[in-house]
Image (cartoon, helix red, strand yellow):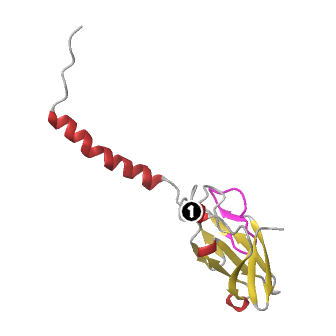
Amino acid sequence: MPARPSPSRRTVLRGAAVAPVAGLGLAACAAPGQGDPAAATPTAPVDLGAETEVPKDGAKLYRDHNVVISRDGSGALKAYSTICTHAGCPIDKLQGTTLICPCHGSQFDAVTGKVVQAPATEPLAELSVKTTKGRIIAGPAA
């Protein structure tokens, strides 16, 4: 059996230069927030701020807590997790009352939690919400 020639120095160096670049592609394709404990919704009630910050027929995104609070025309508050149900990415954009996921473009209605644009197919998880002394408190659904 003939001996295989050993790789040249140029071949070894070329391979070493390409390997780190290939790894960057994998990191760029990973969905932010997947497996990241900081991307989770509250596990206990959290004070989000003044009740007056959420207008009627509007919504406010609380990025630090991965929560959106909306208020309908009657003044009732609703709270939803802003962790996308498609790939687990934290949603970081609110346009009017539409939440837009940065990973794959899923869109959700902040008032109902329902999907308004795929690829997500499941609605956002609803959270409990109440006001105490003019403050919004949201947390896991009871």
Residue that carries the numbered disc 1 in the rendered image: 105
* Relative image position of residue 90 (x, y in whole percent): 59, 65
Q: Quadrant of the C terminus?
A: bottom right
Q: Report the magenta stretch's main SS.
A: loop
Disc 1 is placed on an element classified as loop
Q: Does the magenta stretch include residue 121?
A: yes
Which amino acid, mark 1?
A: Gly
Numbered disc total:
1
**Quadrant housing residue 64:** bottom right
97 over 126 or under it: above or below: below
* Relative image position of residue 98 (x, y in whole percent): 64, 73
Q: Is residue 92 magenta?
A: no
At 52% from the left edge and 60% from the top edge, which residue is drawn? 32
Q: In which quarter of the image is the N terminus?
A: top left
* Relative image position of residue 62 (x, y in whole percent): 63, 77
Specify start and end residues of the magenta stretch as a single range: 109-124
Question: On the rendered structure, is 38 left or right of 1?
Answer: right
At 74% from the left edge and 76% from the top edge, which residue is drawn? 138
128 over 23 or under it: above or below: below
At 79% from the left edge and 85% from the top edge, which residue is drawn? 131
